[in-house]
Amino acid sequence: MIEIKDKIYYVGVNDRNKSRFEGLWPLPNGVSYNSYLIDDDKVCLIDTVEVDFFTQFIENIHEVIGDRPIDYIVINHMEPDHSGSLGLIKKFYPNVKFIGNKKTFGMLSGFYGINGDTIEIKEGDSISLGKHNISFTMIPMVHWPETMATLETTTNILFSGDAFGSFGALNGGLIDSDICCDPFWLEMIRYYSNIVGKYGVPVQNALKKLVEMKIDYICSTHGPVWHEYIYKVMSLYNMMSKYETDEGIVICYGTMYGNTERMAEVIARAASNAGIKNIVMYNVSKTDHSYIIRDVFRYRGLIVGAPTYNTGLYHEMDTLLNEIGNRDVKNHYIGWFGSYGWAGKAVAKIKELNETHLHFEKVGIPVEMKQSMTPEVAAQCEALGKAMAERLKADRCAD
């Protein structure tokens, strides 16, 4: 096992088999379930792993402490990918005490039928393990109501739960200074936008607490241990939780026979000609929405288009816009377009969804195309792309 510092060890596991996290979000590079062990006069386990990996997990623990018992388990987060092994751990270590807050223990009982051997802590409480000392900070709704963070005060190691996590399994190394972190940055944004993105205000509240602490390592429950890049990681969370973005445009479209796609291409070319470099385009039926949502969190402009389908909005676009709206994304601009064969409804439906769900600033004049591209429609598409570019460039002085 990897020693992070002063008898604090990583005992987590990698999952390279699951295809979708929470049954929703693609895992092309897998995911890690991180757990940590403090070996002291009192042995303390910080979180566990998904129950399918229990055999490997218990072997990792035994590699560090042998036949010694675990005295405490700190539960920073009750989601089953981190708490799933608690029931089995209790069978291996019947005298273990579970450390958590008041909201933790209702879930501990509900998920695993564990009702005793608990130590309830509150904000600022601390427990001595011998040479090590752990203190507790409540960070509710990052991203469940019981979530908290645990600071080991002699090493300044923060065990942050899901906060500052990332998709992606760990390929041998663990600490950021020992590995290439390039694959993790976009996966951290995708993880945040997909999993945590709705909870910008709670994340801001958590950051205000954590920024006051001396932190030398951040040990999240997914992804690398952050050491050299702590400032970058916390700055990234600060930016995303305030819905701050870079200059750029996400253009996503639905298309059945290629006509709506042609509109998107004209819009993109016009925006590029008007001086916008960061432009990404997605077919909503081909690219998993996970990646589109990620880039909506990266770029301020959004232009969406789709055909009318069954006198409504093309299904995948309808789903995507609702997914974005459910994350309470702010500070974005939107333009839209659509096409139809015999009854135009898509453009009106996108307008309705923006007014009721997204609440983005409307830019440009929506374009509606009947059947196929004409010079007039092409000119309207060019105007829409240019309008978004000009709106984004107007922010350059403000930024």
Image (cartoon, rainbow, N blue to C red):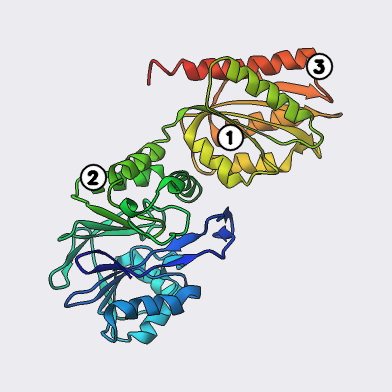
The residue that disc 1 covers is 356
Q: Amino acid at mark 2?
A: Val
Pick the residue in front: 167 or 253.
167
User: Which mark lies nearer to you, 1 or 3?
Assistant: 3
Residue 129: image quadrant is bottom left
Return the disc, 1 or 3, that comes first in the chain's sequence: 1
Q: Is residue 220 above or below residue 3?
A: above
Pick the residue in front: 337 or 224.
224
Q: Amino acid at mark 1?
A: Thr
Q: Dot 1: what SS? A: helix
Pick the residue in front: 302 or 235.
235
Q: Residue at x 37, y 59 (%)?
A: 173
Disc 3 from disc 2: Cα separation = 56 Å
Residue at the extreme right of the image, as rendered: 342
Return the disc, 3 or 2, that comes first in the chain's sequence: 2
Compared across the picture, whether 193 is left or right of 20 comes to left
Residue at the extreme left of the image, as rendered: 131
Q: Residue at x 50, y 74 (%)?
A: 52
10 Å crowding of disc 2: few (<14), some (14-19), many (20+): few
The residue that disc 3 covers is 374
Q: Is residue 312 visible?
A: yes
Quadrant where the N terminus sits is bottom left
Q: Amino acid at mark 3?
A: Thr
